[in-house]
Image (cartoon, rainbow, N blue to C red):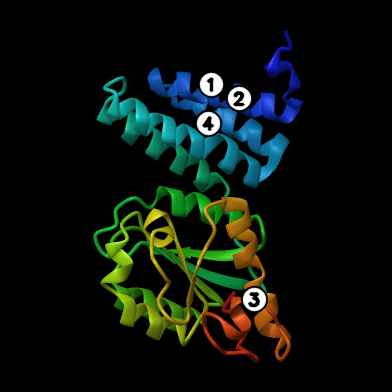
Amino acid sequence: MVDRGSERTPMAQGHDIARRRVMAAVRDLDGATVRDVLLQSLLVHGVDDTVAEVVMPVLRDVGDSWERGELGVLHEHFVSSTFRGVLGELRVPVEGEEARTVVLACPPRELHDLPLELFGAMLRARRWRVVSLGANTPMTAIAEAVRVLSADACVIAGVRRSAFESRMPSLSRLGGRVPVLLAGEGALGLPAPPPRTAVLPADLRAAADVVDAIAPAVRAGAGASGPGASGPGGTGGRREPAVG
């Protein structure tokens, strides 16, 4: 018989080992080990692979283990706090006249902002200036941040479809000012996105690439492709540079 495990690439095997080590450390409430494993993965594999192949699967495993009664609420709080601590070590300022700015937020009554923070780390790795407003953010606050920062893009994430359906007019108005990308299970469950917005793919790396293509497309002016040209934002032309 062929050992299917032996067919996995060294990188995939490395991700498996990292996930198992992090899960074991979460069970033991061992924050130092969680940090060390994640930083080593970041060093070897980069932000995209660490988030997509290690951190997000661990978050799902912790949630599933909680539902089965194998882990408690303390483990969920522990893993969230520890992951946020590691994210804090990655926050290197992105500055300069050509710095691109993205506003990240969860709409009202959406409390699970850690996946959005992880997505922000992937955008920072692409040289975006990330301004995160966190969970439970009023739409007026999101719009004000976009205005004050002259943002190049805005990502709004939620797990409930109703979080978007109940705010269709506000989302469409915001989409008239800046490319608005909707993310999360709630956005993916929409029959159709609000006018002048778009839904990001479930694959985090593909979603980060979609956002990354927006600002260059907007600055390219006529003939640009992607949401910044004729989709969300509807500008199709020049925009003022983002604040660095």
Amino acid marked by disc 3: Gly
Please tell me which residue is depicted at 53% across the width and 31% down the height of the picture.
35
Q: Earlier in the sequence, mark 3 or mark 4?
A: 4
Between 95 and 69, which is closer to the camera in this rendering? 69
Mark 4: amino acid: Arg
Residue labelled with disc 1 = 20
Q: Position of residue 19 (x, y in %)?
A: 55, 26
What residue is at 56 percent from the left and 34 percent from the top? Answer: 54
Q: Are marks 3 and 2 in contact (CB under 8 Å)?
A: no
Question: In x, y percent, where is residue 210?
Answer: 62, 65
Marks 3 and 2: which is nearer the front?
3
Crowd class of label 1 (few under 14; some 14 to 19; many from 20; radius 10 Å) = few
Label pair 2/1, CB-CB below 8 angstroms: yes
Q: Of the residues shown, which amino acid type is indicated by label 1?
A: Arg
Residue 226 - label:
3
Contact between labelled residues 1 and 3, with CB atoms less than 8 Å apart: no
Q: For residue 135, which quarter of the picture?
A: bottom left
Name the kind of residue labelled 2 in the image: Asp
